[in-house]
Image (cartoon, helix red, strand yellow):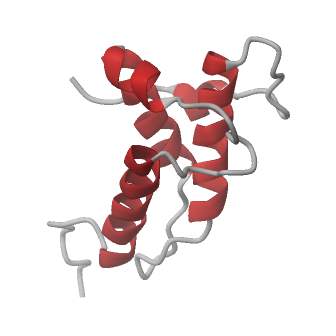
């Protein structure tokens, strides 16, 4: 039997993206790491920064063979680290981002 072609993102992935977008837009993405930093104005003023936040989240997010997300908290944290680095020049991302984490895909 052949695998069915994927026509939609798995429900768990869609839910992870929705929750991530909610926290991001609400200003509550990783409140410990981003406490006191109002990053929303910065992200929404410069579209490429918002693009990178979603790219990092999507690149880090892992999904099992059933479509269940395995690390949405880690993906949120890595995106939050990038935001913190952009808004706080004194912040050092640990571990540093790898190329695959910040790769932009598509057109």
Q: Is residue 94 visible to us here?
A: yes
Against 104, residue 2 (above or below) is below
Residue at 54%, 52% in the rendered image: 28
Residue 96 position in % (x across, y down)? 79, 27
Residue 55 position in % (x across, y down)? 44, 35
The image quadrant of residue 90 is: top right
Against 20, residue 105 (above or below) is above
The image quadrant of residue 82 is: top right
Q: Say left or right for 74 vs 25.
A: right
Residue at 30%, 76% in the rendered image: 11
Q: Quadrant of the N terminus?
A: bottom left
Residue at 58%, 51% in the rendered image: 76
Residue 104 position in % (x across, y down)? 41, 26
Against 26, residue 102 (above or below) is above
Residue at 33%, 61% in the rendered image: 18
Instruction: Name, please, the residue furthest toward the bottom.
Output: 1
Residue closest to the eye, 17 or 62:
17
Residue closest to the eye, 18 or 24:
24
Residue 27 position in % (x across, y down)? 49, 45
Q: Is residue 104 visible to us here?
A: no
Q: Say left or right for 69 vs 43.
A: right
Q: Quadrant of the C terminus?
A: top left
Instruction: Name, please, the residue furthest toward the front.
Output: 36
Q: How many marks?
A: 0
């Amino acid at each position: 039997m052949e695998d069915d072609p994927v026509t939609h993102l798995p429900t768990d992935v869609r839910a992870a993206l929705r929750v991530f977008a909610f926290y991001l837009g609400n200003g509550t993405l990783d409140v410990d790491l981003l406490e006191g930093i109002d990053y929303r104005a910065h992200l929404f003023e410069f579209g490429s920064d918002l693009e990178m936040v979603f790219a990092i989240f999507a690149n880090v997010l892992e999904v099992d063979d059933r479509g269940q997300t395995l690390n949405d908290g880690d993906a949120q944290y890595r995106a939050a680290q990038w935001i913190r680095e952009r808004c706080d020049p004194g912040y050092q991302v640990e571990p540093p981002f790898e190329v695959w984490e910040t790769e932009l895909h598509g057109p």
